[in-house]
Image (tube, rainbow, N blue to C red):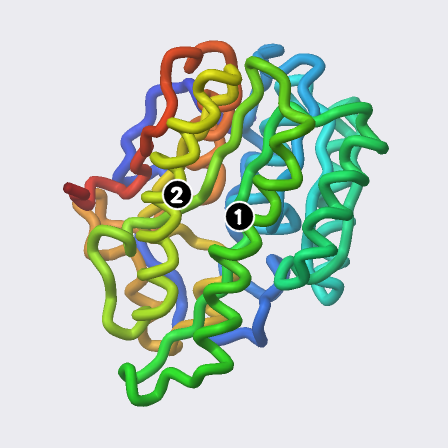
C-alpha cells in the first residue's frame, strides 16, 4: 500500500522529477496527461477534521480542486464542485471519489464569468447540502503569450473575469450564508510574487487575489469568518500542458529547490488545515506550497 500523507518521505524523489513534452487541448482532462497527476486517491487518509462541513470548490473537477474535494470528503465534508461543461468527465470521477468516501458530492457545470451563475451555484450548494461552511475559490484561466503586444483584450477580460471577478461574486453571494467558524480559501500563485512575462495577465490576477484575501479577512473577522489563501508553485495539473508550450512542459518544475513539479495531493493538506478548527487564529494569511521557491 502506498504511504499516506503523513509518512516521512524524501521530497526530492517522492514524485517524478520530469514529464514528457506534451500539449493537450484546453481546458484539459486528467486522462490526457502523461503521467496522470497524483490527487491523493491512493494516499490521502482522513481523520475527521472536517466532519459535518459543507464545501463549495470551484475548479473541483481536476488538479488541485479534485485533490481538495477528495481530501475534504475523506475528512468528513460534503462537497459541491463547479466546472466547465466540457470537463464533465473529470467532474463525474471527482464526484464518484467523494461518494466513495461516504459523503455527498454534487457537480455543477457552468461559466463563472457570469455573475448570475455565481449566485446560483452558491444557492444550489446551500439547497443541496443544507448550508455552506467552506468556499474554495480555485478555478482559474491562464494562457501563455509572447508579450503584452500579443495579449488580446478578449484574453485579458477572460482571465480577469474568471480569476478575479468570479471570486468577488462568489464571496459576495456566500457571505450571508457563512456562520462563525466558516472559511474562505482562495488559490493564488507564486506568480503573484515571481511573475513570468508570458503570464502577464494571469500573474497580475493572482497578485490582486492576495490583496483581496488580506482585505476581506479584515472585514469578515468580526463575523468569525476566516479568509486565507494558498499560493502553489509549479503544480502538475491539466492547466499546464493545456496552456504552455510543449518544450516548457517537459522541464516544468525543474527550477525548484526540490527539483520537480508538485502534485495536487501535496496541496490538499494546506486546504484542509485552513478549513479546519486547527487554524482558528489564522486569517488574512498565505500558505506557500512552492517546492522551496521563495516568496517575499
Report the label total. 2
Residue pictured at 28% horizontal, 31% vertical: 10
Q: Say what secondary structure mark 1 lies in.
A: helix
Residue holding disc 2? 212
Residue holding disc 1? 168
Q: Is residue 153 visible?
A: yes
Looking at the picture, how far across and down is residue 109, in whole percent?
Answer: 76, 56
Residue pictured at 22% horizontal, 49% vertical: 259
Q: Which mark is residue 177?
A: none
Looking at the picture, how far across and down is residue 170, in whole percent?
Answer: 61, 45
Q: Is residue 22 visible?
A: no
* Along the viewing direction, whichever of 48 and 136 lies nearer the viewer: 136
Contact? badges 2 and 1 (CB < 8 Å) = yes
Looking at the picture, how far across and down is residue 115, in whole percent?
Answer: 66, 57
- Residue extending furthest toward the right: 127
Residue 1, quarter of picture: top right
Looking at the image, is mark 2 or mark 1 earlier in the sequence? 1
Looking at the picture, how far across and down is residue 68, in whole percent?
Answer: 56, 35
Residue pictured at 28% horizontal, 43% vertical: 290
Residue 87, quarter of picture: bottom right
Amino acid at each position: 500500500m502506498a504511504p499516506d500523507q503523513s509518512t516521512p518521505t524524501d521530497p526530492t524523489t517522492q514524485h517524478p522529477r520530469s514529464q514528457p513534452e506534451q500539449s493537450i487541448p484546453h481546458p484539459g482532462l486528467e486522462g490526457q496527461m502523461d503521467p496522470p497527476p497524483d490527487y491523493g486517491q491512493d494516499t490521502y487518509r482522513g481523520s475527521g477534521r472536517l466532519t459535518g462541513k459543507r464545501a463549495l470548490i470551484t475548479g473541483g473537477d481536476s488538479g488541485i480542486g479534485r485533490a481538495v474535494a477528495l481530501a475534504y470528503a475523506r475528512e468528513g465534508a460534503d462537497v459541491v464542485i463547479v466546472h466547465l461543461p466540457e470537463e464533465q468527465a473529470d467532474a463525474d470521477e471527482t464526484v464518484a471519489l467523494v461518494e466513495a468516501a461516504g459523503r455527498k458530492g454534487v457537480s455543477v457545470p457552468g461559466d463563472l464569468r457570469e455573475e448570475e451563475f455565481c449566485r446560483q451555484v452558491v444557492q444550489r450548494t446551500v439547497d443541496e447540502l443544507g448550508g455552506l461552511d467552506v468556499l474554495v475559490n480555485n478555478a482559474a484561466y491562464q494562457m501563455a503569450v509572447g508579450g503584452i503586444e500579443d495579449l488580446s483584450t478578449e484574453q485579458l477580460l477572460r482571465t480577469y473575469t474568471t480569476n478575479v471577478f468570479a471570486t468577488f461574486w462568489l464571496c459576495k453571494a456566500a457571505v450571508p450564508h457563512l456562520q462563525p467558524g466558516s472559511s474562505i480559501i482562495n488559490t493564488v500563485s507564486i506568480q503573484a510574487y515571481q511573475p513570468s512575462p508570458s503570464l502577464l495577465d494571469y500573474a497580475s490576477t493572482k497578485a490582486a487575489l492576495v490583496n483581496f484575501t488580506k482585505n476581506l479577512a479584515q472585514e469578515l473577522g468580526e463575523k468569525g469568518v476566516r479568509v486565507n489563501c494558498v499560493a502553489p508553485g509549479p503544480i502538475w495539473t491539466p492547466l499546464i500542458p493545456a496552456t504552455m508550450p510543449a518544450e516548457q512542459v517537459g522541464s516544468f518544475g525543474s527550477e525548484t529547490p526540490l527539483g520537480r513539479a508538485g502534485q495536487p495531493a501535496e496541496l490538499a493538506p494546506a486546504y484542509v488545515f485552513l478549513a479546519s478548527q486547527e487554524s482558528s487564529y489564522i486569517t488574512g494569511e498565505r500558505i506557500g506550497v512552492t517546492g522551496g521557491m521563495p516568496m517575499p
